[in-house]
Amino acid sequence: MNFSESLKKNKDFQIVYKQGESYANRLLVMYVRKNGMTNNRLGISVSKKVGNSVIRHRITRLLRESYRLNESSFVKGIDIVVIARVTAKGKSYIEIESAFKHLGKLHNIVHSTPKNEGEEKK
């Protein structure tokens, strides 16, 4: 994550929950709040209800990778908290990434065309 940091403190998560906007789909819930900085901060939450530690860490890695590969298409200066729902258990990377991008579009924090996608359409 070249342009981003991680949200780690409970206080930071609580601020995003209380002051941010949320949208959800069947796999994920995403809270977004402007942070007044030049970079983004990403927080990921996966409850014990989703599964054991192996499953939770796998979902966390998939979410972090989804963000990392699409980071250049996100607006700068926001805090993002992503919460995995129980239905995310056992889903593939493509399904997780698709749900992540979908929520980004609902929040209007994703540029309409990522930098490399326009070249592929030629």
Image: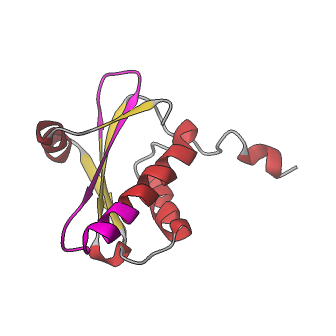
Is residue 31 in view from this perspective? Answer: yes
Which residue extends farthest front?
Answer: 54
**Residue at point 34% right, 61% down?**
57
Q: Image check: 53 left or right of 105? A: left
**Color style of the picture:** secondary structure
Residue 68 spot, x, y in % from top left: 51, 44
Is residue 60 shown in magenta? Answer: no
Residue 28 spot, x, y in % from top left: 34, 64
Residue 92 spot, x, y in % from top left: 51, 72
> Between 11 and 33, which is closer to the camera in this rendering?
11
**Residue at point 64% right, 43% down?**
114
Q: Is residue 105 above or below residue 10?
A: below
Q: Image check: 61 left or right of 31? A: right
The range drawn in magenta is 33-58
Q: Image check: 42 left or right of 114? A: left
Q: Is residue 5 above or below residue 23?
A: above
Which of the 4 image quadrants contains residue 108?
top left
**Residue at point 50% right, 39% down?**
74
Q: How many marks?
A: 0
Which of the 4 image quadrants contains residue 109?
top left
Is residue 103 in view from this perspective? Answer: no
Which of the 4 image quadrants contains residue 40?
top left
Is residue 48 shown in magenta? Answer: yes
**Residue at point 45% right, 59% down?**
62
Residue 49 spot, x, y in % from top left: 19, 74
Q: Is residue 34 above or below residue 101?
A: above
